[in-house]
Structure formats: structure tokens, C-alpha cells
Image (spheres, rainbow, N blue to C red):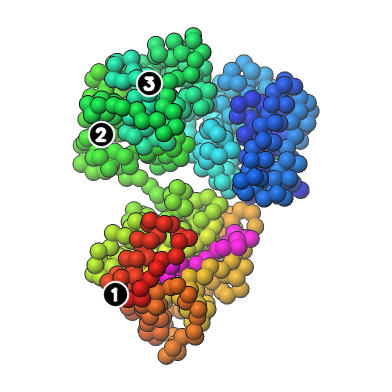
Amino acid sequence: MSYRFGDLQIDTVGVVGSGNIGPDIALYFAKAFHAYGVAVVVVDVSEEAVARGRAKAEQKIAKGRESGAFKPDAADAMLAALTFTTDYAQLAGASLVVEAATENLDIKRKIFAQLESLCGPDAILASNSSHIEPEEIFGGLAAATRARTAVIHYFFPAERNPLVEIVPGRDTDAVLTRRLMGLYEEIGKIPVLVGGRFGYAVNPVFEGLFLAAALAVEEGLGTTKQVDTVARRALGLGIGPFTAMNLTGGNPITNHSLDVMTSKIGPWFRSPRLMKEAMASGTPWAVPKRDEQVEVTDAQEQAIADTMQGAYFGLAGEILDSGIITLADLELGVENGLAMRAPFGFMNDIGVNRALALVQAYAASHPGFPVPRCIEAQAKAGAPFRIEHVIRRDDGDVAILTIRRPKVLNALNDDVYDQLAAHATALGDDTKIAAVVLTGFGPKSFVSGADVNFLAKIGSPAEGVTTSEGSKVPGNLLENLGKPVICALNGFAFGGGNEIAMCCTARLVRKGLSVAVAQPEPNLGIVPGAGATQRLPRLVGVEKAAEMLRTGRAISGREAVACGLVREEVEGDLVGAAVTLARAAARGEVALTPIDRSPMVTPDALPTVELGHLSRATDALICSAIIQGCRRPLAEGLRLESELFGECCATADMRIGVDNFVANGPRAKAEFVHR
């Protein structure tokens, strides 16, 4: 058995190193590939390390079984997939090998020299280095081998932290880089593409913030406990910088890398006195215990917060200035890999001028610290940073748009709507582009719906109409693009996600989704506002559409195909299949039927459905939208839907439903009053 993604076929995965992170990387591969019979082999020269690594993986699988995170059959299959050994020969024939040995260049070079002779000519050889440039690691290999190498940098803990930095070398094949990005997204990671500078993109933030925290202690702003506590609040961190260093065991690597960064990045970087003392003593940092209340004065709080924010913004800006990563990828990487408030959105929230002032103040008192050009330019422009949530990539004459907000399962908000509309307008005018593919980021969700916080801001029926009309703009543009638009439903499409998908010329869905499509608006006490009441009946028929729209029931991918909403299920490379279909449709090789925009015949009353706790007031508005709207041409029906959405915003049940969702989550049933 094997796992296939595009032209990558994976039969065996190797991990070299059974120390701190290797077993966790292997565990993630076992979790991702166990259903496909892929073997995961962990090799280490030390029998003791092999035994520790095996015990660590077995313990984590057992814990997952007990908690219900892993079903018993899956846990058994993961255990069966894993092999821990000192025998390098078991890596022969591996499709992908990730080196996760100690951060020592000589050791890494020796490992890859051995792998080059042991593994086949098509094996992908990767290093989980946290700092070292790819050219340094792979430079001694043959040119043909270097083409299939890259750094794949995991973050602690590797089996749970979603971030990986994909760092190709100068000789890495560009096609392989794209495949690795796609593969890691497919198996549930968040890959970001980074240039090969020492430390890559995210570690200079992590280690730079530790340095800033240590300097704050050295400068007398507070104790390690106080700085740890305030930094966590000031930066939106899950844990403070000293606590993070304790948990990751990061002192030795950080001590070394900060000194290397002095020459590789800039003179502000260096291992501080506090770190040297900690290394000499071997004692962990003094940090707050769980639920410990650490006292700080208001003046301390402000001084520590200002210094940490100034350092943070400056670090992020310097990395962006370096050109090794895009703003959107840096934002995504820091937010998800370090579990903290994303830097450029943070600067937008407090004001870019205020952010620049904090950086300038920090730089003035810390020689060698840069004031980034990007922040200066943005402040001068008097505008916030533009953070891309809809990413465009062209595959020849087919443009691929990816909605990417993984922390909220790609939920729609004003920025996403605006960016979709801007891309659609640009694509309509782009003569080089013959067709478009629209998809979502990751394997879970195409779009989870409209961001409920976005809905909660609606304050009146008039605002409701405006909101509904605005949410229809990008879909209408895609529907009228004049070029085939294929929606690749990589995961479930709820609410506004399905409404955007229905504007596309055709839809494909990942095979095997038990939950693929739903219009869950009735659970929030609202009428669908981005076209579902008009497009869904035209695609699947009035009776089927009415049942889905009124009850919010989700349907599987198979059912979506059976009712005509989706063209087909796709196993494997969904986006690749969508690109093939889009290109064939653009060339006239495949005929795709556009939505019928003419009036429909609808009954005077819809079949009875079981509403349960759902709002009867909302249901009446949904029924009116279907019956009256579908009797009109599509454009007029869409306008009626907007008006009824506005009426809905005046109901008590809309406020009850949205407030309940915000307070209690999607599983809690709202107590509607039916008015």
C-alpha cells in the first residue's frame, strides 16, 4: 500500500534521530499515513535513544486512545506503522526521509552522505534543521541529489504544532517545492515557504523575543516571572518567553543561534548575559506556576509591554524587509507556530504610527536594533498593512485562488469578501488566464461560513440588507466572469462557503467527506444572505433545497453528487483535478452547464419539515425567499433575499441565535421565541 499525492508516491517514510523531536515527527507521519499502510521507520545510532523514542511514541498513542483523540483501530494501526531501529538499511527504498538529529552541521552532512548512497534516486531528503541554511547542509551532495533536498522545519511539539517551514535550497527543484507545500497542507500542516537565511523566518521572532525579555530583566524592568507574565499579556502569547524556553529545552540551541545571528542577521542579536548564566548553572528559568498571580505595578506593566511590543514589531518587520517570506506567510507562521497575536494585524489594530513609535523607541535604547523600512513606509502611507487571506497562484493559464484563514476554518469576513471581489475583477481582465480554480486551505474546511463576529455587528434591517448585498458581490463576479470557474471543495462548505461555491461553474469535492455541504443559518436564526435561497433550488430542485435550507441539515459528498450540487468526488490531488477540468472547459473539450437564471415554477407552500427547536419566524422568511424569489429571474430573486435578510435582522430570534453561537458555540441550541 502507499499514499499518493499528485506525482508523489509515498510507501515508506524515514526519520533519522530519536531524540527530542524525531519521535514526534514520526508520530505525525503515522497519524497521517496509517490508513494507507505507509511504514514509518525511525533510525538512531543509539539503542538507548531508540528505546526512549519508541516509549515516547507509544505513550502518546496510548494517551490519545484514552482521551478519544485516536479510535482504537487507528491507534493500533499507528503503532503497527512505526518501527524504531539502529539499522540504517531499513531506510533503503524510503520515499521521504526527514533528518531530525542534533543541530550540528558535521553530523547532518554525514547523515546525508549516508542517505545519498542508501536511498534511491527519487527519494526526497529533508532536514528538520531549525537554523542552518540548506546550502550548508546539502552542499556536499551531488547536483542531482540536491535537486530533491529541502529543509522542512517542524515546531514544538511536532505532532501537534501545525506549522512547518519549507526551505528550499538554490538547487532544489521548484516542482518538488510546490509538491511539498501541497503535501504538507494535505496532511493537515500549515506550510509556509521561506528563503534559506540562517534561522529562517519564525525562529528569529521566537529567539529574538526571548532576547528582548532577557534584556528587559537585565535592564531592571522586572524579574523573569514579571517579564514572562507581562509579555504573555502584551503579545497575546499562550505562554511567556521564559516558560517556552523551559518547555522546549531550547537554552542550548538559542544560546548558540543568537550568537550566530550577530553576523548572519544583525548586531543586536547575541546571547545575553542572563542566558550565559543559565547555561552555566543548568537551572531552569524562574517562571510563574499554573494560576500563580504575579504582581507588577502599572508602570512596570507599561514599560515591559512597550519594550516587548517594540521588539516584536521590529523583529517581524526586519524579517519582511529581508525578502525571505511574504507578509501573509509570516503572519500565518507566527500566529500558528508560536501561538501569539499575529504581528501585522496587531500593528494595524493599534495603528501603524503607534507601532513605528514603539519600534523607534526600542531601537533608540538598543544599539544595532533595526527600524524596518516596511513599517516606516506603511506609516508614511497612512494605511494599514494589507494582509492577504485569498492567495493567488497561476498554473499556466489557470489561476488558483485559495481562501486561507486556518484558525477559523477559512471563515468569511469583510477582508475575504473584498479580496475575492478584487481577484475576480483582476482575473476577468487578465487575458493570460483562461480559467479559475477556487479552493480553501487545508484538508478540513473549504469555508466554514461567514465569521459570526462579522454577523454580530449588524445593528439594523438596513445594515442587514447592505451586508447581504455586499456578500453577494464576489460570487456574482465569479458567476459572470466569462471564464470557467471550478470550485475544489477540499473540505466542508457551510453557509457562505456553499453560497460562494454555487457561484462557480462546477464543483468537485474531496472523496469520502461524510459532512460536505450545509446551510446552517437556521441554527443561528438567520436567513441565508449570499444567494443560497435562489441558487440552491436551481441546482438541486425546490424540494431538496427547501429541506436543506430550512433544517440546516448537512449532506455528504456522495449525496451532494447524487443531488446534482457537485459534479464528482475526487480522490488524491483535488486541486490538480480541478485545474485539469478548468483547462479542458476553457478549451471547449468539456461542456459545463451554467446555472439557469430564469424564473422557476414553485409551489404555493413547501412540504412540511420537522423544525424542532428552530425559529418559526426565520423559517417563514426562508420559505418566502424560496417561493417568491425563485419565481423571479435570478438577479431579482437575489435582491428579494437581501430584503428578507434585512427583515430577519429585526427579529428577536436572529439576535438570540447569534448571541448564543458567540457565547456557547455551534453545538448549543438557541432558545428561540419565534418572533
Q: In the image as oriented, which residue stretches furthest toward the bottom?
A: 604
Q: Which numbered disc, 2 or 1, marks the residue that appears first in the sequence?
A: 2
* Residue furthest to the front: 292
Q: Which mark is residue 647?
A: 1
Check if residue 208 falls in the magenta segment. no
Where disc 3 sits, the SS reads: helix
Q: Nearer the viewer, residue 147 or 627?
A: 627
Query: x and y percent of residue 281 in the render?
Result: 49, 10
Verify CB contact (< 8 Å) between mark 3 and mark 2.
no
Q: Which residues are magenta?
A: 507-524
Q: Name the residue rendered at 27%, 28% in the picture.
A: 301
Amino acid type at circle 3 is: Thr
Q: Earlier in the sequence, mark 3 or mark 2?
A: 3
Mark 1 or 3: in front is 3
Neighbour class for label 3 at 10 Å: few (<14), some, many (≥20)?
many
**Cα distance, mark 2 to mark 1?**
42 Å
Q: Which residue is mark 3?
A: 224
In the picture, the quarter occupied by the C terminus is bottom left
